[in-house]
């Protein structure tokens, strides 16, 4: 089965954001290029597909200090480390590099749930 087209996923995200919240959909490079133009008062919530995408943003200068990890589905070549997170070797390497760069990564399914550090789950 083919995954849904990107516009379909974007429309779904648009439907679930709170009223008054604006959404933008950028490539990784455009995010790197424009994120620093945001006003200090702006609150920005980034959604990335993979930990490798997050690493690309951080290495490109995007000031990310915390990542909430979730919905990394099981697939061939991945192992499950949490109910909602499955990883492969590339994911693990990206998470370790993010940690080395000072980015805290944790799994937290809902806001009132205590987070679990990815590093502990990968050990």
Image (tube, grey):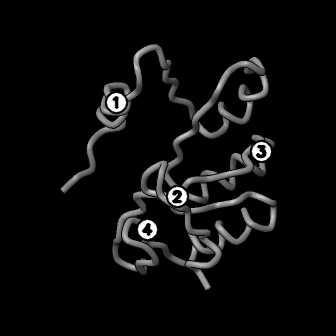
Q: Residue at x 62, y 30 (%)?
A: 44
Q: How far apart are the alpha carbons under marks 1 and 2?
A: 19 Å
In front of the other: 35 or 18: 18
Q: Give the SS element for disc 3.
A: loop
Of labels 1 and 3, the one closer to you: 1
Sequence-wise first label, 4 or 2: 2
Of callouts 3 and 4, which one flags the residue occurring earlier in the amino acid sequence?
3
Q: Which label lies toward us, 3 or 4?
A: 4
When the figure is inspected, residue 60 is found, relative to residue 96, above or below; the finding is above
Extreme residue in the top direction: 20
Per the image, label 4 sits on a secondary structure element best described as strand
Q: Nearer the viewer, residue 32 or 74?
A: 74
The residue under label 2 is 69
Give the side of residue 35 with respect to residue 51, left or right.
right
The residue wearing badge 4 is: 85
Count of marks placed on residues? 4
The numbered mark at residue 60 is 3
Label 2 or label 3, whichever lies nearer to me, is 2
Instruction: Tell me how far mark 4 sits from mark 1, CA to CA.
Output: 22 Å
Query: Which quarter of the rendering shows the C terminus?
Result: bottom right
Q: What is the residue that sits farthest to the front in this orientation?
A: 112
Q: Position of residue 61 (x, y in %)?
A: 80, 42
Say whether disc 4 or disc 1 marks the residue closer to the N-terminus: 1
- Residue 3 lies, in percent from the top left, at 27, 50
Q: CA distance from mark 3 to mark 4?
A: 25 Å
- Crowding at dot 1, Cα within 10 Å, few <14 / some 14-19 / many 20+, comes out as few
Residue appearing at x 61%, y 59% in the figure = 52
The crowd level at tag 2 (other Cα within 10 Å; few <14, some 14-19, many 20+) is: many
Q: Residue furthest left?
A: 1
Residue placed at 80% from the left, 60% from the top?
102
In the rendered image, which residue does mark 1 sit on? 16
């Amino acid at each position: 089965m083919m995954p849904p087209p990107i516009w379909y996923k974007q429309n779904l995200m648009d439907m679930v954001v709170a009223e008054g919240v604006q959404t933008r959909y950028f490539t990784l490079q455009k995010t790197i290029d424009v994120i620093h133009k945001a006003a200090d008062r702006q609150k920005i919530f980034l959604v990335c597909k993979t930990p490798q995408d997050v690493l690309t943003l951080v290495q490109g200068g995007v000031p990310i200090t915390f990542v909430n990890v979730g919905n990394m589905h099981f697939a061939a070549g991945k192992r499950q480390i949490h109910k909602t997170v499955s990883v492969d070797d590339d994911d693990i390497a990206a998470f370790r590099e993010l940690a080395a760069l000072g980015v805290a990564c944790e799994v937290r399914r809902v806001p009132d749930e205590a987070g679990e550090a990815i590093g502990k789950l990968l050990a």
